[in-house]
């Protein structure tokens, strides 16, 4: 049976350039200025999984992001991979959101964008990295959720999904009723790169913009959005400075090993 799938993707600063991120000690905010934005890496795997499910069972794949106008780029990249349409949740009222307010707006955006059988997310972003949004989103939608998914099989009649969920010692196999929110890990698949044809086709696909008013129509009050709807407060931020000290221990291997043991004992490290 065909499924309508929606994938939540987040734009993040390029992880290759994280060393350029600085913290503003006065405001506690992260300064990402000058760092090129990219799609959160694991979210590409979520898009890939949605495309594979569509290829196997039919249906549609929508991609959705909440972010500033520039976040449209990550929707375009997903459309070039093969997604059918995009939804950009963009409004000043959404700014300053913590994970709870993010999930509330994502849920309202999903409701206003159509009827979906399955919502896929990445398991964790590389910048905020809380891993809280998928569970909070499921709660806001009133749907069940499975996180750490490394394999998803949709039952023939599309009423349930069988999911392998990573745990420390191996994996759990769980069955979840649809509609559900499933958050995937990177090892679920290898994602495809957009082809030239895909990039050209992406230009013809629709990206709708959803703002505060549409979220209110979907049942979310303005006080639950952005900073106003965020119970989390950053109490303080600090940059850790590690001092490193290198000392080369020379000589024959046995002598060097004795020297190393002596040093470690002196440092109370043995
Ligand atoms: C007090 C406070 C203020 C903040 N203010 C800002 C701010 O002004 N600007 C800012 O950019 N961030 C801000 N943040 C960070 C913001 O809350 C998080 O980036 C956001 O809530 C997502 O959390 P996360 O990155 O930990 O997501 P995770 O839970 O780690 O993400 C898991 C998955 O959820 C989905 N997801 C997460 N976020 C989005 C999204 N936006 N759109 C679509 N899918 C998504 C993706 O599939 C992702 O892989 C603030 C945080 C706090 C605590």
Image: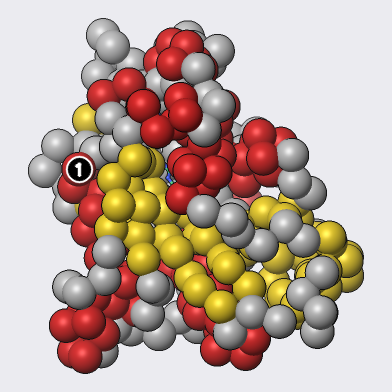
**Label 1 secondary element:** helix
State the image coordinates of residue 240 (x, y, percent, origin top left). Answer: 39, 28
Is 248 placed above or below 59 here?
Answer: above
**172 sits left or right of 142 in the view:** right
Q: Nearer the viewer, residue 77 or 115?
A: 115
Q: Is residue 55 visible?
A: yes
Q: Residue at x 60, y 59 (%)?
A: 116
* Mark 1 crowd level (few <14, some 14–19, many ≥20, 10 Å Cα): few
Is 254 placed above or below 213 here?
Answer: below
**163 sits left or right of 4 in the view:** right
**112 sits left or right of 248 in the view:** right
Q: Nearer the viewer, residue 127 or 107?
A: 107
- Residue 90 placement: quadrant: top left
Q: Residue at x 28, y 12 (%)?
A: 27
Kindly identify which residue carries mark 1: 69
- Residue 40 placement: quadrant: bottom left
Classify the position of the N terminus by image quarter: bottom right
- Residue 242 placement: quadrant: top left
Q: Residue at x 32, y 72 (%)?
A: 79
Is 167 placed above or below 131 here?
Answer: below
Residue sitting at the far left? 34
State the image coordinates of residue 175 (x, y, percent, origin top left). Answer: 88, 66
- Give the total number of marks visible in the rendering: 1
């Amino acid at each position: 049976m065909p499924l309508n799938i929606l994938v939540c993707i987040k734009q993040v600063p390029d992880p290759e350039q994280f060393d350029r991120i600085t913290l503003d000690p006065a405001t506690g905010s992260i300064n990402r200025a000058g760092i090129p934005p990219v799609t959160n890496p694991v979210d590409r795997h979520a898009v890939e999984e949605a495309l594979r499910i569509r290829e196997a069972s039919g249906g549609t794949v929508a991609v959705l992001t909440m972010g500033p106008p520039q976040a449209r780029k990550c929707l375009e990249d997903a459309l070039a991979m093969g997604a059918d349409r995009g939804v950009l949740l963009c409004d000043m009222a959404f700014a300053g959101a913590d994970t709870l307010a993010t999930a509330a707006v994502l849920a309202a955006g999903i409701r206003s964008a159509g009827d979906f059988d399955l919502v896929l997310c990445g398991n964790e972003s590389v910048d905020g990295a809380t891993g809280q949004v998928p569970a909070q989103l499921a709660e806001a939608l009133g749907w069940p959720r499975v996180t750490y998914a490394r394999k998803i099989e949709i039952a023939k009649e599309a009423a349930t999904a069988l999911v392998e969920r990573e745990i420390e010692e191996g994996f759990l196999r769980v069955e979840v009723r649809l509609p559900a929110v499933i958050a995937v890990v990177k090892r679920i698949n290898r994602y495809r790169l957009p082809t030239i044809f895909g990039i050209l086709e992406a230009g013809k696909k629709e990206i709708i913009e959803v703002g505060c008013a549409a979220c209110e129509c979907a049942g979310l009050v303005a006080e639950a959005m952005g900073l106003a709807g965020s119970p989390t407060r950053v109490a303080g931020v600090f940059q850790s400075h590690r001092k490193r000290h290198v000392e080369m221990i020379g000589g024959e291997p046995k002598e060097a090993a004795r020297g190393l043991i002596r040093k470690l004992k002196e440092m109370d490290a043995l």
